[in-house]
Structure formats: C-alpha cells, structure tokens
Image (tube, grey):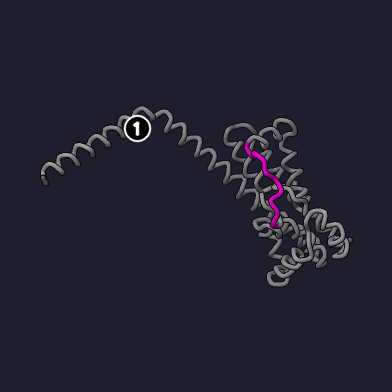
Amino acid sequence: MEIFGADLWHIDFWGDAEKLLQHYGIWAVSLCIFLESFGAPVPAETLLVTTAALASQEKVALPPLLLASWVGAVVGDNVGYMIGRFGGRQLVLRFGRYVFITEAHLGKVEVFFVRYGSWVVLVARFFAVLRQLNGVVAGMGKMAWPRFMLFNMLGAALWVGFWGLGSFWLGEAFHLSFATIKKAGPVLLLGGLGFAATVIVLAYLHRRRHR
C-alpha cells in the first residue's frame, strides 16, 4: 500500500485481515480507518475492501462492518478537524512529519479547498492525501463545524457504501461463479476436448483437400 509516496507495508492483506477480524473484530477495522482519517499512514481503504470481500464468504457480518467503518471515518475526520482548528498549521507541520505529512501535502489539499470549497469534504475520502488531510485542512480554514459534519457524514457514507458494498457484491459474484465452474468442470472439460478435436479434424480435411 503506497501512502504519501512511500511503500510502507508489505503484507498479505487476505490472511492478515482475516486474523485481525478473528482476534479483534470489526472495530479493529474501524480503528484503522479512524487513524488514517487524520494523517496516520494506515492502509484503511485496502483493509475495508478486503474485509468486505471476506464478508461475502460469511466470515464477518456486513452491516456491522459498514457501520463500524462509517463511525471510524466520521470520528477520525472530526479529530483531524479539531487538530487543524485549534492547533493550526504550525502544530500540524511540527508533529505531522512523524506520520509523513509535509507542507507540500497540506498545500495540495488547501488548493482543492480554495477551488471547490466545502464540497471537497464530500468526495475527499475517494482520493489519497485528501482522505487523510481533509479534516485537518477544513479545521485550519475555519470551516463551520456543522457544515463540515454534514458533508463529512455524507462523504463517509458514500465511501463506505461504495467500497464496502462493491467489494462484498464482487466477492459474492466471484465465489458463485467459481462454485458454478467447479461443478461444471467435467462437462466443460469434455466440451473443450470435443471442440479441440473438431478443429483438428476440420483442419486436417481442409489441408488434404488443398493438396
């Protein structure tokens, strides 16, 4: 998972996500999303996709997973907002370097806010860097908290719904297709062999005829 231009984690997400769920439950996913929401280098989006796909295998219940993910996103963004609002740019840059937040990253997000205003909060979670810093920059820019909260809640719902439900449905479709192919394996094998034999015979007859 590449965050802020650095390849930070090399892990088996399927295996590790399953172990994470077994040991700590869905709130571990919520915690990771919470931490990423104010700048921590945690691959939360990948974790959400992976665990939602695992839900299609009935290894975790989907509705609680989606709710926990949404709560983590909303609360994390609000923590970022408070850091930016009451700590300011100086505090963010002073301690942000420990989680790979630089002045250049803040500058990029600020440009988006200047251009698109508070609508950035609505779609921020779909973009790297914006996802980690939109709350911080909104707080630094003194955006009205009720407005931020509204867009933040809607944006988190869109993000969780898109990746959570999308990954669940794709995972379910994949497993159904795989199971169907597995059951139909012998028939498909015989059909394939028959087709190959037909092609070979026709090619042979065509060649003889031209000779």
**Element type at mark 1:** helix
Give the magenta range: 5-14
Residue closest to the eye, 56 or 67: 56
Residue 6 pos. (x, y %):
70, 54
Answer few, some or many: residues within 10 Å of disc 1's Cα (few below 14, many 20 plus, some between 14 and 19).
few
Residue closest to the eye, 41 or 52: 41
Residue 94 pos. (x, y %):
87, 60
Image height check: is 125 above or below 11?
Answer: below
Image height check: is 6 above or below 105?
Answer: above
Q: Which corner quadrant of the image does residue 195 belong to?
A: top left
Residue closest to the eye, 24 or 11: 11
Q: Does the magenta stretch include residue 182?
A: no
Reading the image, the residue beneath label 1 is 188
Q: Does the magenta stretch include residue 9?
A: yes
Amino acid under disc 1? Leu
Residue 156 pos. (x, y %):
69, 52
Residue 185 pos. (x, y %):
39, 29
Picture quarter with the C terminus: top left
Q: Is residue 44 left or right of residue 84?
A: left
Image height check: is 123 above or below 70?
Answer: below
| Residue at 78 percent of width and 62 percent of height | 102
| Residue lying farthest to the front in this orientation | 211
Q: Is the magenta stretch mostly helix, strand or loop?
A: loop
Q: In this view, does 82 lie to the left or right of 196?
A: right
